[in-house]
Image (spheres, rainbow, N blue to C red):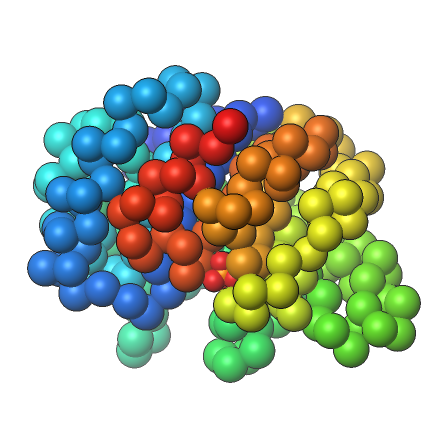
Amino acid sequence: MRNATPIYSEPPVGQIVIAGNWKMYKTQAEALEFLKGFLGQLSETPEDREVVLCVPFTALSILSKNLHGGRIKIGAQNIHWETEGAYTGEISGAMLTELGCRYVVVGHSERRQYFGETDETVNKRLKAAQAAGLTPILCVGETKEQRDRNETEAVIAGQITADLAGIDQQNLVIAYEPIWAIGTGDTCEAAEANRVIGLIRSQLSNPNVSIQYGGSVKPANVDEIMAQPEIDGALVGGASLTPDSFARIVNFQ
Ligand code: PGA
């Protein structure tokens, strides 16, 4: 068994964190093409904003090599809870940190919906991420049916309690992503996202954890979302795939 060396030095507590989630998009060539168009648009981006690209495993290495220690951090989209072993198709924390990875998305609703992720496995993956020195971005959110049944608060509270059991809140980002707003163009009202994020914050032992909103964030709505007092950042899917739109989002007003 190998022990991962933690590389994380400045936990992003209280920081604005804008993260792109590329999901299963972009080959290495396409990732480089994105970078060419994106890097030049960050010269005016305020220093206190953390800019993260959470990309397919296959794009981590090439992005890492081409960022030259610049201001963009890279992240993965999953991590296994064991350090190594017979887990076909899985990836360990040390494998990610070796490639320069700093963040990892854990518990995205697509993994919960399509790949059997549960609060229990989410909790184990969060622990593994922190043990490896990565900052996990924990995703929580309710379905449309749960919202319609007025269960939003209970669902979110349940996820936060179960997912964060035994987790260090000094090295953590949370993303509130209502499932009905993901990839649908149907953004949650900014005031409502702010309200739910406030509820999440009231449940934390460290109220300074950065909490993002995610779900159809785009250039046209990012300014209003980021103007909300409880919202510390955004997790962006579709609109992070093109350099101009993601640049406009990280450079929100
Ligand atoms: P979207 O995805 O921005 O395309 O809605 C967000 C996410 O799944 O993280």
Instruction: Tell me which residue sits at (25%, 60%) in the image.
Output: 57
Q: In the displayed structure, does residue 56 sit left or right of residue 119?
A: left
Tell me residue 111's x, y (percent): 50, 71
Front one among 77 and 248: 248
Residue lying at the far top of the rendered structure: 47
Tell me residue 19's x, y (percent): 43, 44
Q: Is residue 175 visible?
A: no
Residue 194's place in the image compared with 106, above or below, is: above
Instruction: Tell me which residue sits at (51%, 68%) in the image.
Output: 183
Residue 108's place in the image compared with 210, above or below, is: below
Tell me residue 8's x, y (percent): 38, 30
Instruction: Tell me which residue sits at (56%, 65%) in the image.
Output: 185
- Image label count: 0
Residue 48's place in the image compared with 19, above or below, is: above
Quarter occupied by residue 84: bottom left
Q: In the displayed structure, does residue 79 sit left or right of residue 85?
A: right
Front one among 197 and 40: 40
Q: Quadrant of the N terminus?
A: bottom left
Residue 47's place in the image compared with 69, above or below, is: above
Residue lying at the far right of the rendered structure: 150
Q: Is residue 234 visible?
A: yes
Quarter occupied by residue 151: bottom right
Tell me residue 3's x, y (percent): 31, 45
Instruction: Tell me which residue sits at (14%, 43%) in the image.
Output: 36
Q: In the displayed structure, does residue 147 sit left or right of residue 14?
A: right
Quarter occupied by residue 212: top right
